[in-house]
Amino acid sequence: MIAYHPGKREDGLRNGTLKQLFREEIKKSYEEYVEQIGREFAEATTHFQDALNDVLSGGKKLF
């Protein structure tokens, strides 16, 4: 997401709109994540949210 939309990410971080700006990308990524590891594991862990916080939001707990 960041590689394709670096300016969008910067705007979202600056304006506090990161979740809204990347809503569709996050949704698609989560669906792929669930397909790969299974819904039960995805819902039982915070790995996906942790990755969003670490990577997309630059370490800020936004998700």
Image (cartoon, rainbow, N blue to C red):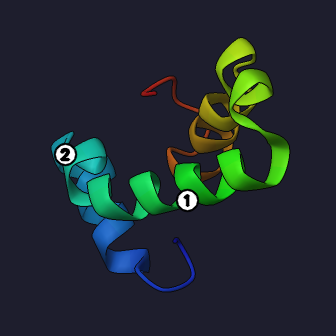
Classify residue 56 as left or right of residue 17. Answer: right
Q: Is residue 24 above or below residue 45?
A: below
Res 32 → quadrant: bottom right
Classify residue 7 as left or right of residue 4. Answer: left
| Residue depicted at 31% across the width and 61% down the height | 24
Q: Earlier in the sequence, mark 1 or mark 2?
A: 2
Residue situated in front as seen by the camera: 32 or 55: 32
Image position, residue 50 (x, y; %) = 68, 30
Res 19 → quadrant: top left
Which of the two marks, 1 or 2, is nearer to us in this view? 1
Residue situated in front as seen by the camera: 3 or 40: 40
Image position, residue 49 (x, y; %) = 60, 31
Image position, residue 41 (x, y; %) = 80, 25
Q: Quick one: SS at disc 2?
A: loop
Q: Circle 2 is placed at which residue position?
A: 17
The amino acid at mark 1 is Ser
Classify residue 24 as left or right of residue 5. Answer: left
Whole-angstrom CA distance, mark 1 to mark 2, is 18 Å
Residue 29 is tagged as 1
Res 3 → quadrant: bottom right
View extreme (bottom): residue: 4
Q: Is residue 46 above or below residue 14?
A: above
Residue 39 is tagged as none
| Residue depicted at 50% across the width and 44% down the height | 57
